[in-house]
Image (cartoon, rainbow, N blue to C red):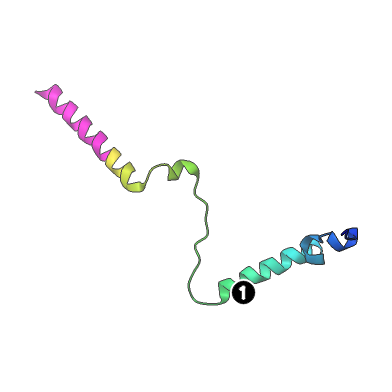
Amino acid sequence: MLLALSATRTVPFAGQTMDQWLTGILEEIRDLYRADQVPWVVGYMHRSLTSQSPLRRMKKKRNKLAEEAAARTRRCA
């Protein structure tokens, strides 16, 4: 069975212009945001900041400071 081309063609943006479609999406997001009193935190974290957890970075810094202190103690002794 063959279908006519017009029956299988999809319409981008649900038959709206791109501007109309984007406006609808933005209104939907705005409505979701205003639906309750819970604030949204929207952000972007660069990959270099997520490669190590804050705890791991803190331990690494602590170990480095301890090694530097030990080296100073050895030089003074």
Residue 16 in view of the camera? no
Residue 54 in view of the camera? yes
Residue 65 higher or lower than 33, as above or below: above
Where is mark 1, residue-wise?
Answer: 31
Q: Residues within 10 Å of mark 1 (few under 14, many from 20)?
A: few
Circle 1: element type: helix
Residue 47 higher or lower than 15, as above or below: above
Residue 31 in the image: x percent, y percent? 62, 74
In terms of image quadrants, where is residue 23? bottom right
In terms of image quadrants, where is residue 57? top left
Residue 17 in the image: x percent, y percent? 81, 63
Residue 62 in the image: x percent, y percent? 25, 40
Q: Is residue 34 left or right of residue 39?
A: right
Q: Amino acid at mark 1?
A: Asp
Residue 65 higher or lower than 43, as above or below: above
The residue lying at 50 percent from left, 66 percent from top is 40
Q: Decide whether the magenta segment is chiefly helix, strand or loop.
A: helix
Residue 39 higher or lower than 66, as above or below: below
Q: Is residue 28 left or right of residue 19?
A: left
Residue lying at the far front in this picture: please name it: 1
Q: Is 72 inside the magenta-drawn segment? A: yes
Quarter of the image with the N terminus is bottom right
Residue 70 in the image: x percent, y percent? 16, 30
The residue lying at 26 percent from left, 34 percent from top is 64
Quarter of the image with the C terminus is top left
The residue lying at 48 percent from left, 72 percent from top is 38
Choose between 33 and 16: the one closer to the eye: 16
**Magenta segment, which residues?**
61-77
Q: Is 35 inside the magenta-drawn segment? A: no
The residue lying at 46 percent from left, 40 percent from top is 48
Residue lying at the far bottom in this picture: please name it: 36
